[in-house]
Amino acid sequence: MSTDELPEHPDWLWSSPEPKRSYDVVIVGGGGHGLATAYYLAKNHGITNIAVLEKGWLAGGNMARNTTIIRSNYLWDESAGIYEHSLKLWEGLEEDLGYPILFSQRGVLNLAHSMQDVRESVRRVNANRLNGVDAEWLGPEEVKEVCPIVNVSPDVRYPVLGATYQPRAGIAKHDYVAWGFARAAAAMGVDLIEHCEVTGIDVVDGRVRAVQTTRGRIAAGKVALCAAGHSSVVGRMAGVELPVQSHPLQALVSELLEPVHPTVVMSNAVHVYVSQAHKGELVMGAGIDAYNSYRQRGAFHIIEQQMAAALELFPVFARAHVLRTWGGVVDVSPDASPVVGLTPVDDLYVNCGWGTGGFKATPGVGWCYAHTIAHGEPHPLNAAFSLERFTTGALVDEHGAAAVAH
């Protein structure tokens, strides 16, 4: 079947079997990371006796609630390594999965509004280049050439002094990405089990044995957590305290508009980022809500601030109408970097702490996490993101590159 003939409704792309009594690997969380992990376990390591457990519907959590930005221009070597690996996978993912994902490499601008922003941005550009990541520093007029609708007037509260630019960055269709991974994993024998909430994790003599679910007990050789904003809750079921806090993260889309915004624009200072989706709606994200919560809804004043910031950068949007708003639940670690690897419980693995950067990492972390699970030791690209760094002090502080939710 060609991609042009693929049915749009996801229920037609995979079956929803009853859970078996046991699996070699049970993945907790049926979002992008869980599905990608299952796919690469099957494809790269030949492990197909896998169950992906999702308490709701497949990819209905943060995967359905993000703003789809993909980039790899992070500061530190460790971050650049895993995000650039992910971006390279994105570039061939549609062909690999045999499913359209609408990956559009339209570039990402990160605006600088102060001399401190400029210094940090130029430093990041240089670090990116040393790591083989495409990155440029643009002045205000060059920013205007890339994105003509950005307001670069010096007579505003946050004047644009320049921007970093990654030409290979862009966006993709988030639900198509999830459906592509799900379809490919299911075709290799992975069981995708929806409406199956994990209520407990059985640990005997320091080793994981099974998960308790709303659809019965499922024995497991290995258990891999991919629960995003609920990672701390699930980890606690196995007696593992994870160093993450959960926050709401909000976004919105406008009514459909004619093509007007050619790239992706992000601003840490005014806490907004804007792109235009394939159908024409403007997609706008904000910073995280300051309070801790597991609710998929945030405070109205964040949306208000986000709209004000967008209008300051893009006066042309003044008469656009908001179509809908939504929120996700992001898990934030102390150093704004993920936690991927082993836990103190044998055969229990964790992938969490991506904060606002989870979507862009989907194929890359799926690849590396699958390696970690299959071999019982970290892939070189996620070795630096172990739990142990919070006791050794070997942090990967990405607050500068991940300061605005994206």
Image (cartoon, rainbow, N blue to C red):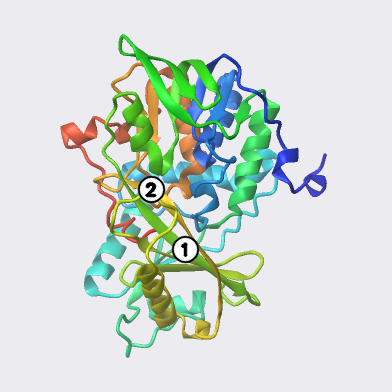
Of callouts 1 and 2, which one flags the residue occurring earlier in the amino acid sequence? 1
Q: Is residue 91 left or right of residue 211?
A: right
> Which image quarter: residue 95?
top right
Which is more toward the observer, 279 or 30? Answer: 30
* Rendered position, 63 above or below 366: below
Could you tell me the amino acid type at mark 1?
Ala
Q: Where residue 393 sits in the image (x, y, percent)? A: 17, 37
Could you tell me the amino acid type at mark 2?
Tyr
Which residue in the rendered view is the most extreme toward the top? 205
Within 10 Å of the Cα at label 2, are there few (<14), some (14-19), or many (20+) other Cα atoms? Answer: some
Q: Is residue 13 left or right of residue 351?
A: right
Q: Quadrant of the C terminus?
A: bottom left
Within 10 Å of the Cα at label 1, are there few (<14), some (14-19), or many (20+) other Cα atoms? Answer: many
Identified at 40% across, 28% down, the residue is 379
Tag shown at residue 251: 1
Q: Where residue 38 sits in the image (x, y, percent)? A: 56, 29
- Camera-near label (1 vs 2) is 2
Tag 2 residue: 294
